[in-house]
Image (spheres, coloured by chain):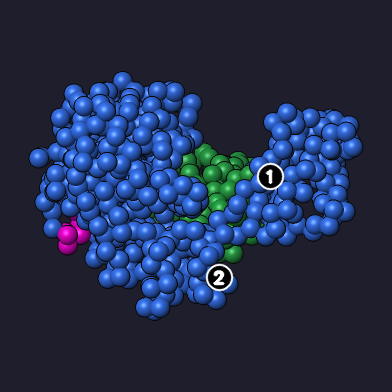
Chain colours: A blue, B green
């Protein structure tokens, strides 16, 4: 192929469900990627798998796949690469295969990428010398967490583009993975289609830049933009990266859709959620964003060139999550010219009542929404008057579930036994939820074995 | 209040912010080369750290991307524990960019408030 069109229809689990269908209805693309996994998502999915061995993947993917059946029937070139497998790619593949088979697409080859899940291998890896040192704090896992085996709920290596390219080479039309680096969802198809070498660092860098730009969906086509008044976002077009065999990249969106693609939307996304721009590390390449140049080449079309890459490192990033107690947040509307004092007093009453019940909460937070709580201390107070109403938001985190249960029960009584002028308790008691703390680490690539299995849809169940 | 013309970062650039664990980053994209030059000299890592002091930021690193007229600020330990542990309404630092755009400076130096 000369030009490869890779689109992205989801930037996180919970993104606009209709976006993938709307995208392929208005543009012929070669690949549709679906990015469903954020740092926190894996631990949430891991908890679902604990309760049900057939759960633990992004169920949104099944709704998306159903919506894509007509496109799969009408567009023979269309392939799908999704990391929706979460912590249970085989279960996701089996559920997807059922949908395809029922739709008469049982002959569709579906690939499953696994090997990223290190949770069952933790004892083995730790005794082989993997300390899983925290990348931020440099603590070792063993010293920081008393019972790592029972406390850790998920441990996943970020795999790269190779297993995706291998699945495509084995004939897969749909590839479902667990944790892979977001950009690798785009790099995999590019490597397969163009046959680039795995040490062609500049081309790997170009594909990685393209993948990084489209991985958050509409964020590169006008979403999350300070220019939100300049275009219609209701029907925002999700992004398409056009890759050429020489490594040139154009970012675009389907014609007739809302939003915009211009140098600003592209550069804002280039620097989104990155650290040192000279070293954007993925399993595929060490990519330098500072050499990249952008130019508008047409309406809603931005070309990127001169991405440069260096050899990839010999480690995979690993994202671990461990149980860290319980948390809850609740809100009340506080009304009146004295709302600030009243809100602060109400919060004090609430925590005092927790103490009376015998619970001193380990961590608490009081926020006055509408009064600069969004960015504490960085609000330009003097420019604004005290509002006539605000939302009191109280939060607590404690190792004891019963302490947090006690906390959420103190909110409603404030209506009748606190100051006058509180409202907004129709939604009921806040939910107490488990906390999964994040532990970023590395593992040598030599200790992780990505696996690929491709079967026809009708042969997966 | 200082005398003379007051300029906001918003007049020179756009920005967006996000999270990496307990750290946040803010990408600032200048409107043109002149604005980029002004931001490079005025919007220092120290100034940004001062602005976000109350978040508990321990260190700010500034990176330059001159070809695309962008600066990237990495704010260490800015997120009260990060997406999984933070008790704040903005667990992922989505609002930091908007706040940074409201920073003002005049003739020669950034205001301290």
Q: Which residue appears at 30% of the width and 41% of the height?
A: A94
Locate residue A264: give its quadrant. top left
Residue B41 picture location, percent across and down: 49, 56
Q: Secondary structure at mark 1?
A: strand
Decide which of tag 2 and tag 1 comes sooner along the chain.
2
Spot occupied by residue A87 in the image (x, y as percentages of width and height): 40, 52
Q: Local crowd at mark 1 within 10 Å, few (<14), some, or many (≥20)?
A: many
Q: Majority secondary structure of the magenta segment? A: helix
Question: In which chain is the residue bearing label 1?
Answer: A
Q: Determine whether A81 is above or below A113 in the image.
A: above
Range drawn in magenta: A198-206
In the structure shown, which secondary structural element does the residue marked by tag 2 occupy?
loop
Q: Nearer the viewer, residue B70 or A13?
A: A13
Q: What whole-number distance in Å separates the C-alpha atoms at marks 2 and 1?
A: 28 Å
Which label lies toward us, 2 or 1?
Answer: 2
Q: Which residue is mark 1?
A: A329
């Amino acid at each position: 192929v000369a030009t490869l069109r890779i689109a992205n229809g989801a930037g996180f689990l919970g993104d606009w469900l209709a976006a993938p269908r709307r995208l392929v209805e208005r543009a012929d693309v070669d690949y549709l990627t679906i990015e469903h996994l954020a740092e926190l998502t894996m631990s949430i999915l891991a908890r679902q798998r604990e309760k049900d061995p057939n759960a633990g993947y992004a169920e949104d993917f099944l709704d998306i796949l159903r919506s894509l059946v007509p496109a799969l029937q009408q567009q023979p070139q269309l392939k799908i690469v999704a990391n929706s497998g979460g912590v249970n790619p085989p279960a996701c593949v089996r559920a997807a295969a059922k949908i395809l088979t029922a739709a008469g697409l049982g002959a569709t080859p579906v690939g499953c990428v696994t090997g990223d899940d290190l949770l069952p291998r933790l004892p083995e890896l730790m005794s082989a010398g993997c300390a899983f040192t925290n990348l931020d704090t440099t603590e070792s896992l063993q010293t920081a967490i008393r019972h790592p085996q029972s406390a850790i709920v998920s441990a996943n290596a970020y795999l790269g583009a190779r297993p995706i390219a291998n699945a495509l080479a084995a004939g897969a039309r749909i590839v479902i993975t667990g944790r892979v680096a977001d950009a690798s969802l785009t790099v995999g198809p590019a490597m397969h289609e163009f046959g680039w070498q795995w040490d062609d660092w500049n081309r790997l860098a170009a594909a990685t830049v393209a993948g990084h730009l489209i991985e958050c969906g509409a964020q590169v086509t006008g979403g999350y933009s300070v220019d939100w008044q300049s275009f219609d976002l209701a029907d925002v077009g999700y992004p398409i990266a056009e890759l050429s065999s020489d490594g040139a990249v154009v970012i675009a969106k389907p014609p007739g859709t809302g939003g915009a693609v211009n140098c600003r939307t592209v550069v804002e996304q280039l620097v989104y959620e990155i650290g040192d721009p000279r070293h954007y590390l993925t399993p595929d390449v060490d990519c330098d964003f500072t050499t990249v140049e952008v130019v508008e080449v047409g309406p809603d079309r931005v070309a990127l060139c001169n991405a440069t890459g260096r050899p990839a490192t010999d480690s995979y990033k690993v994202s671990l999550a461990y149980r860290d107690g319980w948390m809850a947040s609740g809100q009340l509307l506080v009304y009146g010219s004295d709302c600030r004092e009243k809100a602060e007093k109400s919060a004090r009453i609430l925590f005092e009542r927790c103490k009376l019940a015998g619970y001193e909460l380990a961590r608490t937070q009081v926020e006055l929404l509408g009064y600069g709580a969004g960015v504490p201390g960085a609000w330009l107070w003097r420019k604004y008057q005290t509002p006539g109403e605000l939302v009191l938001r109280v939060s607590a985190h404690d190792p004891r579930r019963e302490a947090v249960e006690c906390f959420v029960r103190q909110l409603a009584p404030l209506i009748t036994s606190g100051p006058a002028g509180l409202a907004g308790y129709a939604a009921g008691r806040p939910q107490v939820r488990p906390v999964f703390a994040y532990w970023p680490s590395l593992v040598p690539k030599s200790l992780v074995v990505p696996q690929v299995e491709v079967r026809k849809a009708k042969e997966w169940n | 209040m200082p005398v003379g013309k007051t300029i906001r970062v918003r007049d020179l650039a756009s920005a967006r912010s996000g999270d990496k664990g307990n750290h946040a980053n803010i990408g600032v994209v200048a409107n043109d080369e002149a604005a980029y030059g002004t931001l490079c000299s005025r919007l220092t890592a120290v100034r940004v750290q001062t602005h976000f002091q109350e978040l508990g930021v321990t260190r700010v690193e500034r990176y330059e991307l001159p070809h695309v007229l962008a600066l990237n600020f990495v704010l260490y330990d800015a997120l009260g524990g990060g997406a999984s542990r933070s008790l704040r309404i903005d667990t992922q630092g989505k609002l930091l960019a908007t706040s940074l755009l409201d920073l003002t400076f005049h003739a020669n130096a950034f205001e301290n408030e």
